[in-house]
Amino acid sequence: MEHRRFGDRFASTTITYPPLADNIMPIVGGPTYGDVLVEMTIRDQPTDTTTFATVTSLVGEAAAAIDPALLEEYPILEPFEVLAADPIVAVVDKLDALHWRSLSDKPEDTGLRARDIHDLACLLRHEPTRAALSSDRVAEMHETVVSSLPPGLAGRTNVRPTGGFAASPAFQPGEAAYEALKANYPAIRQYVYTDDHWVGFEDALAIIHNSSNLI
């Protein structure tokens, strides 16, 4: 495992599994690397921006498919609820981070946030999240997100572009931030399990621009 810490508010861990043995067939369309990336941000969660999500483990799902009675025998395998951030907070948080870096003194550092592009594409095509989005809602939530940032980061946040976040240099071909994101994007493929879940860079940007009226 490789641990990285950035200040006192953000940390990441990369868990690397050993390669498959020669006699084990990999999953078709599965990951080409045995890595799992875990990231954590510690900050004050904006009020009224939490929700509950139901989590089902892969083992629990398999047990239910084999014999539902197994869930009664092993209650630990049953689905459970966790407190989670409202998906709109995730959308606004990622848009804000990308936009800020695209206007910084080192816009090429925006490439370090390439995974945010994939995450945004997935969130923006997720129907329950998309249905809750609107330009006014994003503008309101942006102020809420900015006010919850640690003191050392609050002063760095830029104002949302007049035309919405889709107008940010981060999403404009030819801009340094855009080109850095495009160059770094292939590296995040290892964190997406199957080809069915992977969204290519051009497709991801199309989803973002097609959501310009919402963000």
Image (cartoon, rainbow, N blue to C red):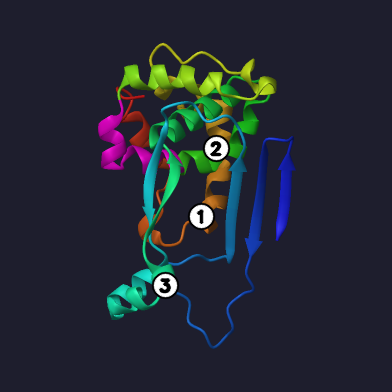
Asked if marks 3 and 1 touch (Cβ < 8 Å), the reply is no
> Which residue is disc 1 drawn over?
189
Q: Position of residue 201 (x, y in %)?
A: 44, 43
Q: Quadrant of residue 90?
A: top left
> Which residue is disc 2 drawn over?
181
Q: Secondary structure at mark 3?
A: helix
Q: 10 Å neighbourhood of mark 1: few (<14), some, or many (≥20)?
A: some
Q: Secondary structure at mark 2?
A: helix
State the mark number for residue 66. Answer: none
Asked if marks 2 and 1 touch (Cβ < 8 Å), the reply is no
Q: Which one is in front in this view, the residue at disc 3 or the one at disc 2?
A: 3
Indicate whether 208 appears above or below 2.
above
Q: 10 Å neighbourhood of mark 2: few (<14), some, or many (≥20)?
A: many
Q: Residue at x 57, y 65 (%)?
A: 33
Indicate whether 35 appears above or below 10.
below
Q: CA distance from mark 2 to mark 1?
A: 13 Å
Q: Is residue 81 visible?
A: yes
Q: Residue at x 70, y 22 (%)?
A: 152
Nearer to the camera, 45 or 180: 45
Q: Position of residue 109 (x, y in %)?
A: 65, 32
Which residue range is magenta in the image?
A: 119-133
